[in-house]
Image (cartoon, rainbow, N blue to C red):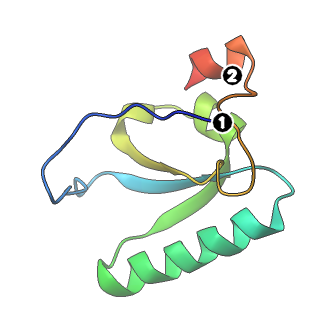
């Protein structure tokens, strides 16, 4: 079982113009990649937002991480956060 703790925010979240959306998926997961492509298409059509599909390692090692908006799709098939090692967690 995974538990996700978050903080309530306003109903709408505006992505800053200089921000880029990053969809984070597990390498080799066809289901997460398919979902990411669907999200990418929907964001492109409805919000005119360009986004990239990246792995957790690419997201963790990216420069200027605070300028990006990340959507993690890692928990869609199996628990990810529960099974993550300490180093990976710290990189989040």
Residue 77: quarter of image: bottom right
In the image, taking residue 91 as reference, residue 83 lies left or right, namely right
Which type of secondary structure does the marked residue at label 2 adopt?
Answer: helix
In the image, taking residue 57 as reference, residue 2 lies left or right, namely left
As drawn, 92 above or below 47: above
Identify which residue is drawn at 51% across, 53% down: 22
Q: Earlier in the sequence, mark 1 or mark 2?
A: 1
Identify which residue is drawn at 57% across, 79% down: 38
Q: Position of residue 30 (x, y in %)?
A: 82, 68
In the image, taking residue 64 as reference, residue 40 lies left or right, namely right
- Camera-side residue of 77 and 46: 77
Identify which residue is drawn at 21% across, 40% down: 8
Which residue is the extreme one toward the right?
A: 28
Q: State which quarter of the image contains the N terminus.
A: top right
As drawn, 27 above or below 66: below
Q: State which quarter of the image contains the C terminus.
A: top right
- Camera-side residue of 72 and 45: 72
Which residue is the extreme one toward the front?
A: 1
Instruction: Determine which residue is flagged by label 2.
Output: 88
Residue 33: quarter of image: bottom right
- Camera-side residue of 22 and 9: 9
As drawn, 54 above or below 50: above
Q: Residues within 10 Å of mark 1 (few under 14, many from 20)?
A: few
Q: Position of residue 20 (x, y in %)?
A: 40, 55
Instruction: Determine which residue is flagged by label 1.
Output: 1
């Amino acid at each position: 079982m995974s538990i996700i703790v978050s903080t309530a925010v306003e109903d709408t979240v505006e992505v800053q113009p200089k921000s880029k959306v990053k969809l984070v998926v597990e390498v080799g997961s066809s289901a997460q990649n398919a979902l990411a492509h669907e999200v990418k298409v929907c964001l492109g059509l409805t919000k005119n937002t360009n986004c990239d599909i990246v792995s957790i390692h690419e997201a963790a090692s990216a420069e200027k991480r605070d300028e990006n908006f990340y959507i993690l799709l890692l928990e869609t098939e199996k628990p990810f956060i529960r099974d993550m090692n300490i180093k990976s967690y710290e990189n989040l």
